[in-house]
Image (tube, rainbow, N blue to C red):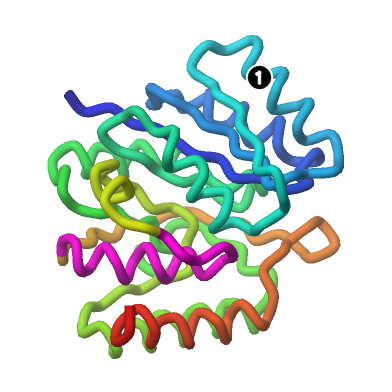
Amino acid sequence: MYSLCVIVPFYNEEKFLKKSIESLLDNDVYDQIILIDDCSNDKSPQIAQDFEKRIKKIEYYSNKHNGGKGSALSEAFTKVTTSHVVIHDADLEYYPSDIIEMKSLSENNQDSLILGSRFIGNKHRDNLYKRTYVANKVMSIFFSVVNFYNISDVATCYKLMPSKFIKEIRLKENGFSIEIELLSKFLRYNKSIIEVPIRYSGRSYSEGKKIKTTDGFLYLLNTIKYRFFI
């Protein structure tokens, strides 16, 4: 039986978390919703716990220490009970309605990774920072060349994967480079990644955007590391 879990990692997202979870529930195609707190020090935990109390399928967990997105996902992956899992960041940059199309493709390609791409198709995108747009393009081209497999958007949040994949691997990255590690290891697991156009509305650093220039360099270094050394 096909079933889907959505994981929502968050850290200090009190401004956006409630609306982000509500947007998921508006497009309810999930059997399990995991809210994973990376040791927030604002009101985010209370918001998440309130949803857990009211909605049966929602589960709330918290890291003991702030370790980064990768750390939060690694913890959440151990709690997944469904056949497939998808990641949704809490910052309102993505649109959960796009997951519906991803799920439909996944049901017909259950061993594949379905990747939501911000660079293919003609869906609406609001790229606030041109440098980030260019950097993402460069990183994706670099990853594609190194791995001999074309991926248009390696830094995207939206990845829908078979749960048996995440149960079989051991993840190492604690930060944003988890995106590179997941893709690199999936290509070893099954060389089948299907990309789907998604919408995107980038937020500003003043609104809480957390990824930094140094993370971009780590993406490049980790592309090499996971291709040739790990």
Give the extent of the magenta segment.
Answer: 171-190
Residue 210: % across, % down: 72, 64
Residue 227: % across, % down: 30, 82
Front one among 127 and 8 = 8
190 with respect to 40 (left or right): left
Picture residue at 67% right of the left edge, 82% below the top: 213
87 with respect to 62 (left or right): left
Front one among 223 and 22 = 223
**Quadrant hosting residue 186:** bottom left
112 with respect to 79 (left or right): left
Q: Report whether residue 31 is seen.
A: yes
Magenta region includes residue 129: no
Front one among 41 and 158 = 41
Disc 1 packing (10 Å; few <14; some 14–19; many ≥20): some
Residue 75: % across, % down: 52, 44
Relative to residue 19, is residue 28 depicted above or below?
A: above
Residue 81: % across, % down: 35, 28
Q: Identify residue for label 1.
A: 51
**Quadrant hosting residue 120:** bottom left
Q: Report whether residue 98 is seen.
A: no
Magenta region includes residue 188: yes
Amino acid identity at mark 1: Phe
Number of marks in the image? 1
Numbered disc 1: secondary structure: helix
Q: In which quarter of the image is the N terminus?
A: top left
Relative to residue 227, is residue 56 depicted above or below?
A: above
Q: Quadrant of the C terminus?
A: bottom left
Picture residue at 51% right of the left edge, 49% below the top: 73
**Quadrant hosting residue 80:** top left
Picture residue at 79% right of the left edge, 65% below the top: 205
Picture residue at 48% right of the left edge, 64% below the top: 178
